[in-house]
Amino acid sequence: MTDAHFDQLNRRQFAGLLGAAAAGWAVSPFATTAKEQDFKLRYIVGSCMYGYTDVAEIVPEVRKTGATAIDIWPKKHGNQREQLDEMGEEKFAELLKKNNVTLGCITQYKLGPFKLQKEMRLAQRFGCPTMVTGGSGPKGLKGKELKAAVGDFIEKMKPHLAVAEETGVTIAIENHGNNLIDSPDSLKYLAELRPNKHLGIALAPYHLPQDEKLLADLIKTVGNSIAMFYAWQHGMGCMKKLPKEQELLQMPGRGDLDFAPLLAALKTINYRGWTEIFMHPVPRGIPILETTSQVTAEINRSRDYLTKLL
């Protein structure tokens, strides 16, 4: 939908549709209340788990996984972001409303951290509070050089964080491999130096040492700067084709990583951000399993594992 077409819509109808589609959008998913005494994970479903499946087939699965929101991915991992453009915002809002699902996150690695302004306006129209992308800067740094580089990155982000504040979005930077933000120290510096809550962390254990104590301590250190927690472990990796049983070792409860200390740390900081049960298939763009029902069942298998740990 172009800006001109959007302007031509009955704004009152469209706003009402979005409001009905997401009764919870008016309240930040990271907010806490005095009544919330029992710690629970707030689940979101990554659309790319279903590959290039039609988004109209994926959205009805969201609630089946115990999630309330969807994280839409663009190509090459998924193509649901492109599908949104094809179907138009109004029809996408209708789809969300029909299934009592919110748009909780838009993942945009291909745009990078400095080209998200238009995407944040889209997020604002849907009440979407989160956007995930990668960092930008030199690689392989340590110590003071690393901290200075993280500081430079944050300085460059400030004009974009002003738009994030205006649109109510948190830009969460994932600790992606071979990146400025790819190590425990870089995450600590990002949490320490961030100017406000509109810059956060998308924490991916997959890309960090598979050491439960290190990961738990890191969670407690960076604390409420985490906006997205990927329930995702390294297993046998996701860069080469493996037998499916080995590929699935990235999922919680299948590989060797014990998530109990990580969940205990999340509980300690009273984590209120999203939790996305996650893995990457090989090649990218295919569902993690052959059928939509199998993907949903596999997500639930991991969710059952995490629930028992809690």
Image: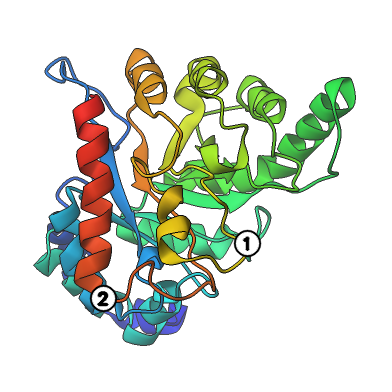
Residue 229 vs residue 12, the one in the foreground:
229
Q: Position of residue 45 (x, y in %)?
A: 31, 55
Q: Secondary structure at mark 2?
A: loop
Label disc, if present, on residue 239 of the rendered structure: 1
Which amino acid type is shown beneath numbered disc 2? Answer: Thr
Residue 92: name its quadrant. bottom left
Which amino acid type is shown beneath numbered disc 1? Answer: Met
Left or right: residue 267 versus residue 17 is right
In primary-sequence order, the first of circles 2 and 1 is 1
Left or right: residue 186 versus residue 41 is right
> Are circles 2 and 1 on residues that touch, CB within 8 Å?
no
Query: Which residue is denoted by mark 2 in the rendering?
Result: 291
Quadrant that contains the N terminus:
bottom left
Left or right: residue 210 versus residue 251 is right
Tell me the distance, in whole angstroms, between the alpha carbons under discs 2 and 1: 22 Å
The answer to whether any part of residue 102 appears in the image is no
The answer to whether 174 is drawn above or below residue 96 in the figure is above
Q: Position of residue 161 (x, y in %)?
A: 59, 42
Q: Position of residue 98 (x, y in %)?
A: 10, 69
Q: Residue furthest right?
A: 145
Identify the residue shown where x is 38% and y is 29%.
259
Identify the residue shown where x is 29% and y is 75%.
55
Quadrant that contains the C terminus:
top left
Q: Position of residue 183 (x, y in %)?
A: 69, 33
The answer to whether any part of residue 82 appears in the image is yes
Q: Residues within 10 Å of mark 1 (few under 14, many from 20)?
A: few
Q: Residues within 10 Å of mark 2 (few under 14, many from 20)?
A: few
Q: Secondary structure at mark 1?
A: loop
Identify the residue shown where x is 40% and y is 79%.
52
Label disc, if present, on residue 207 of the rendered structure: none
The answer to whether 191 is drawn above or below residue 112 in the figure is above
Residue 160 vs residue 290, the one in the foreground:
290
